[in-house]
Amino acid sequence: MKKIIFVLIVFSALMPLYGSGKNETAAVRIALLPDLNSIPFAVADINGYFMDEGLDVEIEYYRSAKDRDTAFFSGSVNGVSSDLLSAAFAENSGFDIDVTSKTTGSYRIVASGSLDINSVDGLENRTIGISRNTIIEYAADRILEKRGSDPDFVRKVVIPQMPVRLQMLDEGKLDSALLPEPLASLAVSKGGKVIDMTDNLLIEPAVMIFKGDFVKKNDKLLDRFYTAYNRACEYINSTDQNEWIDSIISEIGFPPPVKGIIEIPFYPEAEVPGYPEMENVLEWLKKRDLVESSLSAEDILKSSYRVDKKGK
């Protein structure tokens, strides 16, 4: 009898994590950065959409991708808002990860307001602040390539810390910088000028990544997670941002000056990443010998969970 009672107690303790009933509370821990990709998750949390789905979602916000990834790979969180480059690095290193959906962000080349530059052509032989071998450098190269320019025609200056990159642009120590939103809008408010952006060119490397074993055990939980996410996207798209931007600035930790200048994109419902973007990322990484030549898009986008078949 004691053994039966013990088993029931253990099973009851595990049910919040692996149960499929909507009335059960399930715990999910995710790590986010202070960027546009994080807004729907924050709205879903603030507005109680996760709770409506029976989810106890704990969100940790990190100031750097390095700290976010450390939390993920150490097991502190189940999932991260990340990018296809990080997914490729993880798969190349043998980590069991699943890319479950795209997310929506924006990466922009901002030129110094003191310069008469109106397009990427004006960046020839000028400096651009980036972080090396990251989504930032990838986005910069892809923008230049899509505009018909060789990425080597600019002079890259490696500045990993985004606030420092922003400050150097503002002080005229850089001719341009690649910045994510909302830092790009903050740079514009200080006199900078956006000369191109990933959203204009359908460059979409931002994704949500979960631990592989977590995904395999929690497909119904992820259905509920993305139901809340999609509800948040609909809310954002259909309301005036002034109704919720103060809460988001406080929750995510955006610099307060972004209020009134941040450009909120249209957030589509969650969808699976496309193979063409993954292949572009791999081509870029392999040219730099950053991943094994045998690594394929299929290896990385192998998730057992497909958000486009949610609930089916």
Image (cartoon, rainbow, N blue to C red):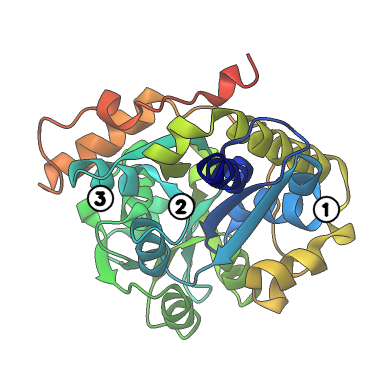
Q: Mark 1 — residue?
A: 47
Q: Mark 3 — residue?
A: 151
Q: Mark 2 — residue?
A: 119
Residue type, label 1: Asn
Provide the secondary structure element on which disc 2 rests.
loop
Label 3–label 1 contact, CB within 8 A: no
Residue 65: x percent and y percent? Answer: 40, 64
Report whether 224 appears left or right of 33: right
Residue type, label 3: Pro
Residue toward you, 37 or 197: 37
What is the quadrant of the C terminus in the image? top right
Provide the secondary structure element on which disc 3 rests.
helix
Q: Residues within 10 Å of mark 1 (few under 14, many from 20)?
A: some
- Farthest residue in the bottom direction? 171
Q: Answer above or below: position of 164 versus 242.
A: below
Report how far apart the C-alphas of labels 3 and 2 lie in the structure: 14 Å
Q: Can residue 27 be seen by looking at this rendering?
A: yes
